[in-house]
Amino acid sequence: MTPQARGIVLALLAFALYAGHDTLVKLLGGRHAPFQIVFFTVLFAFPLSTLMLIGDREPRSLRPVHPGWMAARTVAIVISSAACFYAFSVLPLADTYAILFAMPILITLLAIPILGERVRLRRGVAIAVGLIGVGIVLQPGQAELSLGHLAALISALGSATAATIVRRIGRDERNVAMLIYPSVATFVVMGTALPFVYTPMSGLDFGLNALIALLAFAAMLLTIEAYKRAEAALIAPMQYSQMLWAVFYGWLLFDEWPGTATFAGVTLIIASGLYIVFREARGGASENTPVLRTRSRAATPSAPRISTARRMLGLGR
């Protein structure tokens, strides 16, 4: 098997683990508030993240070089994490993924004001097609939109904002700072809300929370290995394999089956995302290639962002 093929296999395995992670979030979401699930997931993830922190030997201060941008990124991650867990708790898995898959489209849009990108006609058409796909999934005026749909959109927007900000400040900020501020902020915010939403958890539920953290961390490591072996343009599209797992787990565990609108909308969203990825890979379409360099999926608070983890492990950006 060639290195490129190994990278693709590792990426498919990583996103299978992420799908399992999201399924467990949905299972717990039927019994506990999203704030509570995020709090304990981040708590169980701290020992794993600490192992990465120990390996960082940069002598610089943890004080941000760009405090405003760092604060904006932290807020975006905290909001995105809570919104993502809420969306998975209340929406069908396939519907949640369909909306989260809009993240490359949103990154391309946000790169205009944040990175000074210029979007030419072809990428503009791809963005429009993707947004039409989101509209088909949401079916405004035909189906009742819930807080879950809004939460999924907020999560996608928050994750896209955080990813785009990294492209702007990542070269200047210390890797530990990029990891620790969002983690601590998420823990504190969710902990503050915990007394108002807490419901007693069984030993099984605590175990599932710990498993969520472990799956996210393992998937992150597999994703890093995948990017070491294959080009980003080959690995990035593998995230869409999560839709297959969403359909399978939704049918098996939750008696869910995506409607025609979901299938049609997600087809347009994926087509748009793939076009943007391959246009950036060809060169000349983007100075910053913000989508190709965004290696973290939407809102996984229990594991470091892929780009940050890669730098901490000495693997570049």
Image (cartoon, rainbow, N blue to C red):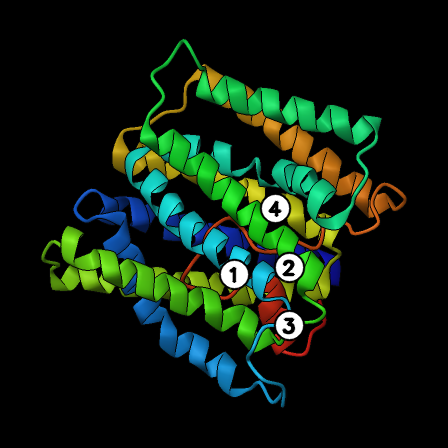
Residue 289 percent across, percent down from the top left: 77, 49
Residue 62 percent across, percent down from the top left: 55, 80
Marks 3 and 1 sit apart, C-alpha to C-alpha, by: 11 Å
Q: Are marks 2 and 1 in contact (CB under 8 Å)?
A: no
Q: Tell me the tag on residue 166.
A: 2
Identified at 72% across, 71% down, the residue is 316
Mark 4, residue position: 238
The disc, 2 or 1, on the residue closer to the chain's N-terminal end is 1
Q: Quadrant of the C terminus?
A: bottom right
Give the amino acid type for the residue marked by disc 4 in the picture.
Met
Identified at 50% across, 82% down, the residue is 53
- For label 1, the SS is helix
- For label 4, the SS is helix
Mark 1, residue position: 71
Give the amino acid type for the residue marked by disc 2 in the picture.
Val
The disc, 2 or 3, on the residue closer to the chain's N-terminal end is 3
- For label 2, the SS is helix
